Image (tube, helix red, strand yellow):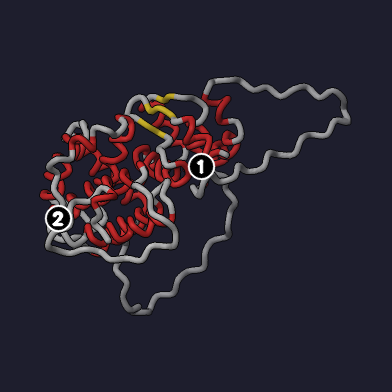
Amino acid sequence: MEPDVRFGGPTLSTGPAAIFRLPPGPETQASPAYMRATLLLLLANTVCFADGPPGEAERRYLGAYAEVAPGLTEAEKHRLRAHLRWRFTTDARLTGLKPRLDSLRAQDRPAIGRFLVSVAAADGPVSPAEVKVLEKVYRLLGLAPGDVYGEIHAHSVSWAAREPVSVRAAGPAHGGFAIPAPPPRQVELDGARVERKLADSAAVSALLGSIFQDEEPTSSTEIADPPPAEEPLVAGLDAAHSALLRALAARPSWGRVELEALAADQGLLPDGALDTINEAALEASGEPVCEGEDPIEMNEEALKELLA
Protein backbone atom coordinates (compact mmCIF):
# COMPACT_ATOMS: atom_id res chain seq x y z
CA MET A 1 0.00 0.00 0.00
CA GLU A 2 0.92 3.66 -0.23
CA PRO A 3 2.03 5.53 1.76
CA ASP A 4 4.74 3.14 3.00
CA VAL A 5 7.44 4.25 5.46
CA ARG A 6 9.85 1.72 3.92
CA PHE A 7 9.74 3.70 0.69
CA GLY A 8 9.97 7.22 2.05
CA GLY A 9 6.28 7.75 2.84
CA PRO A 10 4.86 9.14 6.07
CA THR A 11 3.48 6.88 8.79
CA LEU A 12 0.01 5.71 7.79
CA SER A 13 -2.71 7.23 9.96
CA THR A 14 -6.44 7.69 9.71
CA GLY A 15 -7.17 8.75 6.14
CA PRO A 16 -6.95 7.56 2.53
CA ALA A 17 -4.47 4.95 1.33
CA ALA A 18 -3.83 3.34 -2.06
CA ILE A 19 -3.94 -0.48 -2.25
CA PHE A 20 -2.36 -2.00 -5.35
CA ARG A 21 -1.02 -5.27 -6.74
CA LEU A 22 2.71 -5.58 -7.32
CA PRO A 23 4.21 -7.72 -10.09
CA PRO A 24 5.90 -10.97 -8.94
CA GLY A 25 9.30 -10.62 -7.32
CA PRO A 26 10.71 -9.42 -4.00
CA GLU A 27 10.68 -5.74 -3.12
CA THR A 28 13.88 -4.15 -1.92
CA GLN A 29 14.54 -0.74 -0.45
CA ALA A 30 13.62 2.34 -2.46
CA SER A 31 16.16 3.33 -5.10
CA PRO A 32 17.51 6.90 -5.39
CA ALA A 33 15.52 7.27 -8.64
CA TYR A 34 12.28 6.36 -6.86
CA MET A 35 13.02 8.77 -4.00
CA ARG A 36 13.67 11.58 -6.50
CA ALA A 37 10.40 10.84 -8.27
CA THR A 38 8.34 10.89 -5.06
CA LEU A 39 10.04 14.12 -3.95
CA LEU A 40 9.13 15.75 -7.26
CA LEU A 41 5.52 14.57 -6.94
CA LEU A 42 5.36 15.91 -3.38
CA LEU A 43 6.46 19.37 -4.59
CA ALA A 44 4.01 19.19 -7.50
CA ASN A 45 1.25 18.22 -5.08
CA THR A 46 1.73 21.40 -3.04
CA VAL A 47 1.36 23.43 -6.24
CA CYS A 48 -1.74 21.50 -7.37
CA PHE A 49 -3.55 22.04 -4.06
CA ALA A 50 -2.65 25.75 -3.87
CA ASP A 51 -6.00 26.81 -5.39
CA GLY A 52 -8.10 23.74 -4.61
CA PRO A 53 -8.01 20.00 -5.34
CA PRO A 54 -6.10 19.01 -8.52
CA GLY A 55 -8.13 19.27 -11.70
CA GLU A 56 -8.28 16.75 -14.53
CA ALA A 57 -5.56 18.50 -16.55
CA GLU A 58 -3.13 18.51 -13.61
CA ARG A 59 -3.90 14.83 -12.90
CA ARG A 60 -3.20 13.88 -16.51
CA TYR A 61 0.03 15.91 -16.55
CA LEU A 62 1.45 14.27 -13.43
CA GLY A 63 0.13 10.88 -14.52
CA ALA A 64 2.13 11.23 -17.73
CA TYR A 65 5.25 12.02 -15.69
CA ALA A 66 4.71 8.94 -13.50
CA GLU A 67 4.66 6.78 -16.65
CA VAL A 68 8.04 8.04 -17.91
CA ALA A 69 9.91 8.76 -14.65
CA PRO A 70 13.47 7.59 -15.43
CA GLY A 71 15.46 4.86 -13.73
CA LEU A 72 12.59 2.92 -12.12
CA THR A 73 12.07 -0.83 -12.00
CA GLU A 74 8.71 -2.27 -13.05
CA ALA A 75 7.72 -2.70 -9.39
CA GLU A 76 8.69 0.90 -8.63
CA LYS A 77 6.56 2.13 -11.53
CA HIS A 78 3.53 0.31 -10.08
CA ARG A 79 4.25 1.77 -6.67
CA LEU A 80 4.74 5.29 -8.07
CA ARG A 81 1.33 5.17 -9.81
CA ALA A 82 -0.29 4.19 -6.50
CA HIS A 83 1.71 6.86 -4.67
CA LEU A 84 0.41 9.49 -7.09
CA ARG A 85 -3.20 8.35 -6.63
CA TRP A 86 -2.75 8.70 -2.88
CA ARG A 87 -1.14 12.13 -3.30
CA PHE A 88 -4.21 13.36 -5.16
CA THR A 89 -6.34 12.69 -2.07
CA THR A 90 -4.46 14.87 0.40
CA ASP A 91 -2.65 18.20 0.46
CA ALA A 92 1.10 18.04 1.07
CA ARG A 93 3.13 20.38 3.26
CA LEU A 94 6.51 21.98 2.62
CA THR A 95 7.64 21.68 6.23
CA GLY A 96 10.62 19.40 6.84
CA LEU A 97 11.58 19.20 3.17
CA LYS A 98 14.82 21.17 3.27
CA PRO A 99 17.08 18.21 4.26
CA ARG A 100 15.76 16.21 1.28
CA LEU A 101 16.08 19.16 -1.10
CA ASP A 102 19.66 19.85 0.02
CA SER A 103 20.66 16.54 -1.59
CA LEU A 104 19.64 17.80 -5.05
CA ARG A 105 22.36 18.89 -7.45
CA ALA A 106 22.49 22.66 -8.04
CA GLN A 107 22.28 22.24 -11.82
CA ASP A 108 19.06 20.20 -11.50
CA ARG A 109 17.14 22.75 -9.45
CA PRO A 110 16.17 25.21 -12.23
CA ALA A 111 14.72 22.30 -14.22
CA ILE A 112 12.64 21.27 -11.19
CA GLY A 113 11.36 24.84 -10.90
CA ARG A 114 10.37 24.89 -14.57
CA PHE A 115 8.60 21.55 -14.19
CA LEU A 116 6.55 22.86 -11.27
CA VAL A 117 5.58 25.97 -13.25
CA SER A 118 4.37 23.69 -16.07
CA VAL A 119 2.29 21.74 -13.51
CA ALA A 120 0.68 24.96 -12.32
CA ALA A 121 -0.07 26.00 -15.90
CA ALA A 122 -1.46 22.59 -16.94
CA ASP A 123 -5.06 23.68 -16.28
CA GLY A 124 -4.80 27.24 -17.58
CA PRO A 125 -3.44 30.56 -16.26
CA VAL A 126 -1.34 30.30 -13.09
CA SER A 127 -3.39 31.62 -10.15
CA PRO A 128 -2.01 34.01 -7.47
CA ALA A 129 -2.25 31.21 -4.90
CA GLU A 130 -0.12 28.95 -7.13
CA VAL A 131 2.42 31.76 -7.62
CA LYS A 132 2.72 32.14 -3.84
CA VAL A 133 3.43 28.43 -3.38
CA LEU A 134 5.89 28.42 -6.31
CA GLU A 135 7.82 31.27 -4.68
CA LYS A 136 8.08 29.25 -1.45
CA VAL A 137 9.32 26.19 -3.35
CA TYR A 138 11.86 28.30 -5.26
CA ARG A 139 13.26 29.57 -1.93
CA LEU A 140 13.58 26.00 -0.66
CA LEU A 141 15.38 25.05 -3.89
CA GLY A 142 17.82 27.93 -3.44
CA LEU A 143 16.42 29.72 -6.49
CA ALA A 144 15.39 33.38 -6.68
CA PRO A 145 11.63 33.64 -6.00
CA GLY A 146 11.40 36.41 -8.61
CA ASP A 147 12.40 33.91 -11.29
CA VAL A 148 8.93 32.37 -10.98
CA TYR A 149 7.42 35.21 -13.01
CA GLY A 150 9.95 34.86 -15.80
CA GLU A 151 9.33 31.11 -16.01
CA ILE A 152 5.55 31.64 -16.11
CA HIS A 153 5.95 34.16 -18.91
CA ALA A 154 8.35 31.92 -20.86
CA HIS A 155 5.97 28.98 -20.47
CA SER A 156 2.94 30.97 -21.63
CA VAL A 157 4.82 32.37 -24.64
CA SER A 158 6.20 28.98 -25.70
CA TRP A 159 2.75 27.39 -25.31
CA ALA A 160 1.05 30.16 -27.30
CA ALA A 161 3.58 29.70 -30.09
CA ARG A 162 2.49 26.05 -30.47
CA GLU A 163 -1.22 26.81 -30.51
CA PRO A 164 -3.15 27.81 -33.65
CA VAL A 165 -4.55 31.33 -33.71
CA SER A 166 -8.35 31.50 -33.60
CA VAL A 167 -9.51 33.75 -36.43
CA ARG A 168 -13.25 33.25 -36.09
CA ALA A 169 -15.40 30.87 -34.11
CA ALA A 170 -16.88 28.02 -36.13
CA GLY A 171 -20.48 28.49 -37.20
CA PRO A 172 -22.95 27.71 -39.96
CA ALA A 173 -22.11 29.04 -43.40
CA HIS A 174 -24.45 31.70 -44.80
CA GLY A 175 -23.56 31.16 -48.44
CA GLY A 176 -23.89 33.68 -51.23
CA PHE A 177 -20.24 34.18 -52.05
CA ALA A 178 -18.19 31.88 -54.23
CA ILE A 179 -14.56 31.31 -53.35
CA PRO A 180 -12.43 32.54 -56.30
CA ALA A 181 -10.11 30.12 -58.00
CA PRO A 182 -6.53 30.34 -56.72
CA PRO A 183 -4.04 32.12 -58.97
CA PRO A 184 -1.50 30.04 -60.89
CA ARG A 185 0.97 28.67 -58.42
CA GLN A 186 4.41 30.13 -58.53
CA VAL A 187 7.33 28.30 -57.04
CA GLU A 188 9.20 30.53 -54.64
CA LEU A 189 12.15 29.47 -52.54
CA ASP A 190 12.36 30.53 -48.92
CA GLY A 191 15.98 31.66 -48.82
CA ALA A 192 16.28 31.53 -45.04
CA ARG A 193 14.88 28.00 -44.87
CA VAL A 194 17.13 26.76 -47.65
CA GLU A 195 20.12 28.28 -45.90
CA ARG A 196 19.22 26.51 -42.63
CA LYS A 197 18.89 23.16 -44.40
CA LEU A 198 22.28 23.56 -46.09
CA ALA A 199 23.89 24.57 -42.82
CA ASP A 200 22.55 21.62 -40.82
CA SER A 201 25.16 19.16 -42.07
CA ALA A 202 27.99 21.57 -41.16
CA ALA A 203 26.53 23.17 -38.04
CA VAL A 204 29.54 22.47 -35.85
CA SER A 205 32.10 24.05 -38.16
CA ALA A 206 29.79 26.91 -39.08
CA LEU A 207 29.27 27.86 -35.44
CA LEU A 208 33.04 27.90 -34.88
CA GLY A 209 33.38 30.35 -37.74
CA SER A 210 35.31 28.02 -40.04
CA ILE A 211 35.47 28.87 -43.73
CA PHE A 212 34.77 26.10 -46.20
CA GLN A 213 36.16 26.08 -49.69
CA ASP A 214 35.47 23.51 -52.35
CA GLU A 215 38.50 21.53 -53.44
CA GLU A 216 39.54 21.80 -57.04
CA PRO A 217 38.64 18.67 -59.01
CA THR A 218 41.64 16.51 -59.83
CA SER A 219 40.39 15.81 -63.32
CA SER A 220 37.68 16.89 -65.69
CA THR A 221 36.03 13.50 -65.37
CA GLU A 222 35.64 13.66 -61.58
CA ILE A 223 32.02 13.07 -60.54
CA ALA A 224 30.57 15.42 -57.93
CA ASP A 225 29.50 13.90 -54.61
CA PRO A 226 25.74 13.53 -54.13
CA PRO A 227 24.11 16.07 -51.79
CA PRO A 228 24.19 15.04 -48.12
CA ALA A 229 21.12 13.26 -46.79
CA GLU A 230 18.89 15.16 -44.41
CA GLU A 231 19.97 14.71 -40.79
CA PRO A 232 17.86 12.16 -38.84
CA LEU A 233 15.63 13.26 -35.99
CA VAL A 234 17.03 12.96 -32.47
CA ALA A 235 15.23 11.07 -29.68
CA GLY A 236 11.73 11.81 -30.92
CA LEU A 237 12.37 15.55 -31.38
CA ASP A 238 11.12 17.33 -34.48
CA ALA A 239 13.48 18.64 -37.17
CA ALA A 240 13.89 22.12 -35.67
CA HIS A 241 14.68 20.88 -32.14
CA SER A 242 16.95 18.14 -33.51
CA ALA A 243 18.92 20.72 -35.52
CA LEU A 244 19.21 22.99 -32.47
CA LEU A 245 20.49 20.12 -30.31
CA ARG A 246 23.11 19.17 -32.92
CA ALA A 247 24.23 22.79 -33.05
CA LEU A 248 24.49 23.00 -29.26
CA ALA A 249 26.56 19.80 -29.23
CA ALA A 250 29.38 21.71 -30.96
CA ARG A 251 30.56 23.30 -27.71
CA PRO A 252 30.41 22.50 -24.00
CA SER A 253 29.08 25.95 -23.09
CA TRP A 254 26.96 28.69 -24.70
CA GLY A 255 26.15 32.25 -23.73
CA ARG A 256 22.50 33.30 -23.50
CA VAL A 257 22.76 35.60 -26.52
CA GLU A 258 24.31 32.82 -28.59
CA LEU A 259 21.51 30.42 -27.59
CA GLU A 260 18.85 32.93 -28.61
CA ALA A 261 20.50 33.32 -32.02
CA LEU A 262 20.66 29.55 -32.58
CA ALA A 263 17.03 29.12 -31.54
CA ALA A 264 15.93 31.96 -33.82
CA ASP A 265 17.66 30.25 -36.75
CA GLN A 266 15.31 27.30 -36.23
CA GLY A 267 12.23 29.45 -35.61
CA LEU A 268 12.11 28.47 -31.91
CA LEU A 269 11.76 30.34 -28.63
CA PRO A 270 14.88 29.64 -26.53
CA ASP A 271 13.30 28.72 -23.19
CA GLY A 272 10.58 26.56 -24.69
CA ALA A 273 13.14 24.85 -26.95
CA LEU A 274 15.42 24.04 -23.98
CA ASP A 275 12.47 22.63 -22.05
CA THR A 276 11.53 20.38 -24.98
CA ILE A 277 15.12 19.18 -25.45
CA ASN A 278 15.59 18.57 -21.72
CA GLU A 279 12.34 16.57 -21.56
CA ALA A 280 13.69 14.29 -24.30
CA ALA A 281 17.00 14.03 -22.44
CA LEU A 282 15.27 13.09 -19.18
CA GLU A 283 13.40 10.29 -20.96
CA ALA A 284 16.56 9.03 -22.68
CA SER A 285 19.14 9.37 -19.90
CA GLY A 286 17.42 10.55 -16.72
CA GLU A 287 19.33 13.84 -16.81
CA PRO A 288 18.84 17.21 -18.54
CA VAL A 289 21.24 17.92 -21.38
CA CYS A 290 21.20 21.74 -21.08
CA GLU A 291 21.93 23.16 -17.63
CA GLY A 292 22.18 26.70 -16.28
CA GLU A 293 20.87 30.06 -17.47
CA ASP A 294 23.88 32.07 -18.69
CA PRO A 295 26.03 30.34 -19.68
CA ILE A 296 24.16 27.19 -20.69
CA GLU A 297 26.34 24.14 -19.97
CA MET A 298 26.01 20.93 -21.98
CA ASN A 299 25.77 17.65 -20.04
CA GLU A 300 28.15 15.38 -21.97
CA GLU A 301 26.74 12.11 -20.63
CA ALA A 302 23.14 13.04 -21.47
CA LEU A 303 24.30 14.31 -24.87
CA LYS A 304 25.92 10.95 -25.67
CA GLU A 305 22.67 9.16 -24.83
CA LEU A 306 20.62 11.46 -27.05
CA LEU A 307 22.95 11.38 -30.07
CA ALA A 308 23.81 7.68 -29.82
Image coordinates of residue 138 in percent, x first then y, are 19, 37
In screen coordinates, is 95 left or right of 285?
left
How packed is label 2: few (under 14 Cα within 10 Å), some, or many (20 or more)? some
Work out whether residue 12 or residue 107 is closer to the camera in this orientation and state it.
12
Image coordinates of residue 110 in percent, x first then y, are 29, 35
Q: Looking at the image, is mark 2 or mark 1 nearer the viewer? A: 2
Q: Is residue 64 above or below residue 210?
A: below
Marking on residue 91? 2
Image coordinates of residue 90 in percent, x first then y, are 16, 59
C-alpha distance separating marks 2 and 1: 39 Å
Q: Is residue 44 above or below residue 304?
A: below
Instruction: Please state, as top left, top right, bottom left or bottom right, where the C terminus lies in the image.
Output: top right
| Residue name at image x 14 percent, y 44 percent | 94
The residue at the far front in this view is 26
Marking on residue 242? 1
Residue type at mark 2 is Asp
Image coordinates of residue 53 in percent, x first then y, are 16, 61
